[in-house]
């Protein structure tokens, strides 16, 4: 089983919908400080059910929703979709 794609919309610093495709091999997320690298791993934790705002680096759960920025209005909903390839059958299916 492997993670193939992650879609984020309105999650923390990702105001617009962003799709991250994870191809075979090693994937590295790089960029300058403050560009949202840690928010990618926070999104994975959140979509898998993390309930602690502190572990998602926030003060309250509402902090995962994009709060607005210069010239950008806040959004009122966030969505994260995780796509897994289970072609190897590691995850049991009914």
Image (cartoon, helix red, strand yellow):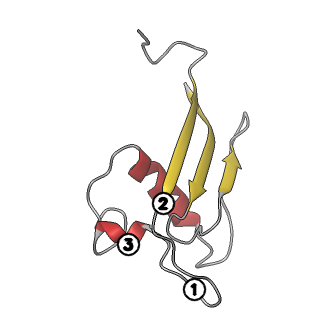
| Quarter residue 93 falls in | top left
Residue occupied by mark 2? 78
Q: From the viewer's perspective, tell me whether residue 77 is left or right of residue 56.
A: right
Q: Is residue 28 visible?
A: no
In front of the other: 73 or 36: 73
Residue occupied by mark 3? 63
| Mark nearer the N terminus (2 vs 3) | 3
Q: From the viewer's perspective, tell me whether residue 53 is left or right of residue 36.
A: left
Q: Secondary structure at mark 2?
A: loop
Cα distance between the residues tagged 1 and 2: 16 Å
Cα distance between the residues tagged 2 and 3: 10 Å
Cα distance between the residues tagged 1 and 3: 14 Å
Question: Vertical placement of 22 versus 75: above or below?
Answer: above
Give the image location of residue 60, x and y in percent.
28, 71
- 1 and 3 marks in contact (CB < 8 Å): no
Question: Vertical placement of 73 versus 46: above or below?
Answer: below
Give the image location of residue 20, x and y in percent.
68, 50
Give the image location of residue 43, x and y in percent.
48, 55
In the rendered image, which quarter contains the N terminus? Answer: top right
Q: Circle 2: is it few (<14), some (14-19), or many (20+) Cα within 10 Å?
A: some
Identify the disc placed on residue 69: 1
**x 54%, y 65%: residue:** 10
In the rendered image, which quarter contains the C terminus? Answer: top left
């Amino acid at each position: 089983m492997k993670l193939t794609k992650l879609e984020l919309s309105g999650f923390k610093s990702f105001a617009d919908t962003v799709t991250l495709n994870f191809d075979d091999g090693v994937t590295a997320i790089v960029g300058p400080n403050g560009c949202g690298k840690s928010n990618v791993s926070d999104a994975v934790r959140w979509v898998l059910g993390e309930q602690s705002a502190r572990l998602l680096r926030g003060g309250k759960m509402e902090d995962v929703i994009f709060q607005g920025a210069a010239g950008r209005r806040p959004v009122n909903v966030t969505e994260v979709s995780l796509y897994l390839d289970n072609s190897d059958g590691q995850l049991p299916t009914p």
